[in-house]
Image: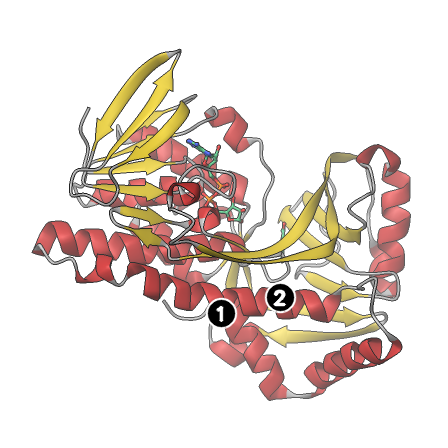
Amino acid sequence: MRTQVCIIGGGPSGLLLGQLLLKQGIDAVVLERKTRDYVLGRIRAGVLEVGMADLLRQAGVANRMDAEGFIHEGTIISNNNDQFRIDFKKHTGTPVIVYGQTELTRDLYDAREHSGGKTIFNVENVVINDAKTESPYVTYQLDGIEHRIDCDFIAGCDGFHGVSRKSIPNTVRKEFEKVYPFGWLGVLSETPPVSHELIYSNSDRGFALCSMRNANLSRYYIQAPLTDKIVDWSDNLFWDEFKRRVPENIADTLITGPTIEKSIAPLRSFVSEPMRWGRLFLCGDAAHIVPPTGAKGLNTAASDIHYLFAGLVQYYKERDDAGLELYSEKALARVWKAERFSWWMTSLLHRFPDQTDFDLKMQATELDFLRDNESAQSVLAENYVGLPY
Ligand code: APR
Ligand code: PHB
């Protein structure tokens, strides 16, 4: 088989690139290790920057997001009972859109099926070959039979555990990592959200976040030790702990109910450089991970796709490879800013096991400063709604 762009990974990055290319008449095949249902079973974040929303519109997959997504013009930050609001609209003129990644991925799969884009599921042993030549190819197995796809370019959109990043030799690749000493215990519950805006809450007992998926589906998180087991967190224990970490008025009005999903996710900051090796381009989680504080994971994947898509269009329409040549540099410049912001938000809002009294005072003072200082709020708002592409 031959295609122009072989996309490894059918998560949001790979699917978004596939749809954008299809609209431009550029042929792409998506190879996915799992099934569509498996990919759609993963619960991920749900805050979209307007830059990402525009990209989805450009890809023709934004109808449901525009109809059902919530426009959020601000967010609440709390420190125990002290609450204040960051006004995105006032500081940046821009809101964010709250729309779950699961729904977005479903829209991308539906659009791909509708437009006849080729997706091959259940592929095994994907191998990237000759990425440093002008004739790269990808091999994989399906039902035990070996297949080969010849292509012009390979987009490595296969997430943190994929093969693409590891195909770049160790001598070329440099990885930067910070692992945080806690995770996020998250639940979904079919209850109305407690607040119409997200609440990021620091408390003496640790971090908590109030988020949502729709008018009757809430997403709540608390910081928890990575050694905790889900079975030890009954719904009652979760709600009790959650209520102790959010401001009293929120705890008092919270509607609790049985949870329909519960999981603990580790927090990590990670970047792999470069994001291009010959004709292989890494996008999204394949190249970088952020802790979820600040909701930058999906949005940073989208900005990679923006740069790669622009470079590929320039190549195919104008026979100019300048955009592709600059891909890694441009993508990484924005990635590092999202890394900085996510690391900062994480440091501001969590309790760390080794925090000294001095560290705690610094954290509390930083929160006070943010509450009282318009410039500091403006910086947070600019980063939260998304830096320009
Ligand atoms: N071959 C084919 N597909 C693979 C392989 C492989 N060897 N390894 C992994 N995959 C698939 C995974 O099954 C997954 O569906 O690649 C996909 C990668 O998807 P994600 O992990 O979701 O990564 P990405 O598409 O970059 O999405 C961006 O932003 O909010 C964050 O982490 C969150 O998923 C989100 C990400
Ligand atoms: C979510 O809704 O899952 C969510 C929202 C904001 C974050 C992280 C996760 O910062």
Residue 321 falls in image quadrant: bottom left
Question: Where ligand 2 lies, by quadrant?
Answer: bottom right
* Residue at 14 percent of width and 53 percent of height: 315
* Earlier-in-chain disc, 1 versus 2: 1
Q: Is residue 258 visible?
A: no
- Residue 301's x, y, as percent? 44, 52
Element under label 2? helix
Nearer the observer, 227 or 196: 227
Q: Position of residue 303 (x, y in %)?
A: 39, 58
Q: Quadrant of the N terminus?
A: top left
Left or right of residue 58: residue 386: right
Residue 197: quarter of image: bottom right
Towards the viewer: 75 or 349: 349
Query: Is residue 168 at least partly visible in the picture?
Result: yes
Q: Are marks 1 and 2 in contact (CB under 8 Å)?
A: no
Check disc 2 and report the residue beneath it. 343
Identify the residue at image location x=47%, y=61%. Answer: 49
Badge number at residue 73:
none
Among all residues in the image, which is located at the extreme front? 171
Is the CB–ligand 1 distance for label 1 below 8 Å?
A: no
Q: Nearer the viewer, residue 364 or 144?
A: 144
On the image, numbered disc 1 is attached to which residue? 337
Give amino acid for label 1: Lys
Rounded to the nearest angstrom, the CA distance separating label 1 from label 2 is: 10 Å
Q: Mark 2 packing: few (<14 Cα in 10 Å), some, or many (20+)?
A: many
